[in-house]
Amino acid sequence: MASLPLATAEVCDSNAGLILNGDLRALQPIFRIYGRRQSFAGPVVTLKIFEDNVLLREFLEEKGHGRVLVVDGGGSTRCAILGGNLAQLAQNNGWAGIVINGCIRDVDEINGCDVGIRALNSHPIKSNKKGVGEKHVPVTFAGTRICDGEWLYADSDGILISNSELTV
Ligand SMILES: O=C([O-])CC(=O)C(=O)O
């Protein structure tokens, strides 16, 4: 049986030492909350792209196995790199969530999907389809460096990155 997601505030309260030494970091609160799953957690897979979502689709076509896709879209607010079709793919392939330093579109459809989504904002224009980007590279946004294989915990209070899986 899947256990309840950890509450981020509790995780911070009971892991002050990890926050001090940098093993547990909170992303700056720059994200909006989308998708039906308010709380989600899982091992991180990273992707660095810019206004081009071909590699994002490639990841979401894989089985998610409860992972969280962390996408550094360079903070672009000039187009959307995730839309309703990709969010449905994420839901159907068992991804726990997607955190995007960039924009999404088809918000109403995305809010009906059983997956957790965080993004800067929405934008009606779709992205390029060139296939440029880098998978599994360290990314830095919202004041935080995030590496493949780290753990992400998200709920209504915020988003945490931990070097390793946490238990309370
Ligand atoms: O295809 C795209 O660029 C994103 C999109 O709109 C979708 O996933 O529905």
Image (cartoon, helix red, strand yellow):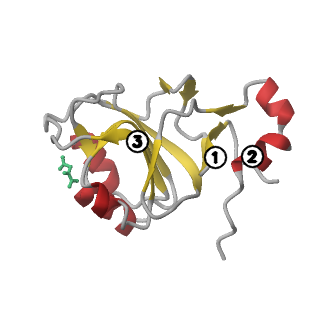
C-beta proximity under 8 Å, tags 2 and 1: yes
User: For mark 2, does the 10 Å Cα neighbourhood hold few (<14), some (14 to 19), or many (20 or more) residues?
Assistant: some
Q: Does residue 101 sit above or below 65 in this rendering?
A: above
* Mark 3 residue element: strand
Q: In whole angstroms, how far apart are the C-alphas of marks 2 and 3? A: 21 Å
Query: In the picture, which quadrant includes the N terminus?
Result: bottom right
Tell me which corner region of the image, top left, top right, bottom left or bottom right, holds residue 79. Answer: top left
Check disc 2 and report the residue beneath it: 9
- Amino acid at the residue labelled 2: Ala
Q: Amino acid at mark 3?
A: Ala
Residue 84, horizontal then vertical, whole percent: 25, 58
Left/right of residue 100 with respect to residue 17 in the rendered view: left
Nearer to the camera, 76 or 43: 76
Residue drawn at 55 percent across, 31 percent down: 146
Q: Residue at x 44, y 29 (%)?
A: 137
Residue 86 in the image, given as x and y percentages of width and height: 27, 56
The answer to whether residue 160 of the structure is visible from this angle is: yes
Give me the residue at 14% from left, 35% from top. Answer: 128
Tell me where residue 95 appears, x and y as whole percent. 44, 59
Which numbered dot is residue 157?
1
Q: Amino acid at mark 1?
A: Asp
Of labels 3 and 1, earlier in sequence is 3
Measure the C-alpha gap from mark 3 to mark 1: 15 Å
Helix, strand or loop at mark 1: loop
